Amino acid sequence: MDRERIARAVREMLCAIGADPDSVELQETPRRVAESYGEFFAGMGVDPGSLLVDAAVPVNGDTGELVLMRDISLRSVCEHHLLPFRGRAHIAYQPGERVVGLSALPRVVAALAARPQVQERLGEQIAQVLEDGLSPRGVVVVLEAKHGCVADRGVRETDVEAVTIASRGALADPAARAEVLALIGPGVERQSK
């Protein structure tokens, strides 16, 4: 990532909106934005599939029916307005011959989210990485997020949350997917008692 170039672009943007980039208040802003973009877009050039390679463990079909990880923190930047969106990812898969260490799932989410994104594509990419890397019998990825481009501009709906679903294999079947969604959804504690 070319942070010097980002800083120059931010300086130019400040000039374009009529601000003085040399003022005491703004003189460090181009550097700060470049540093934050380094974090926001750290997934550029990262192969998320490589995060599963060392974490995958052969189980030869000797597993439970479902692996479900809820409430993985999600932060990304909308590619349309370069504004953040934040929320949660929920990932479920039916193991085939391999399972993956649980810490690998948040790493895959973080790597794919750390690039300019749209939520709909992000869920599909996570599902595809798991399918390609683990060959599970099925995958469901549910993303719930609030978007800066909806909350802070345009319609300015601050409490709206977008929900997207990506599914593959046996979990793409409507009945199987509904079962997973019930586990992810609110009231799970009451349902399991």
Image (spheres, grey):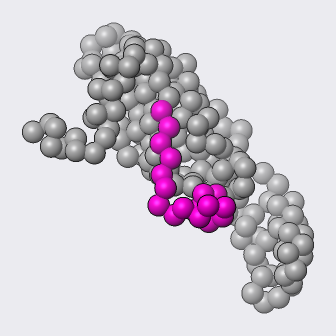
The image quadrant that residue 35 belongs to is bottom right
Q: Is residue 80 above or below residue 179?
A: below
The extreme front residue here reads 155
Q: Position of residue 102 (x, y in %)?
A: 38, 35
Q: Nearer the viewer, residue 84 or 34?
A: 84
Q: Position of residue 67 (x, y in %)?
A: 32, 28
The structure residue drawn at horizontal position 82% and vertical position 67%, both measured from the top left corner, is: 10
Viewer can see residue 105: no
Query: In the rendered structure, does residue 49 fall within the stretch colored magenta?
Result: no
Which residues make up the magenta segment? Answer: 149-165
Q: The C terminus appears in which quarter of the rendering?
A: top left
The extreme bottom residue here reads 24
The image quadrant that residue 55 belongs to is top left
Q: Position of residue 72 (x, y in %)?
A: 42, 45
Query: In the rendered structure, does residue 153 fall within the stretch colored magenta?
Result: yes
Viewer can see residue 155: yes
The extreme left residue here reads 193
Label count reads 0
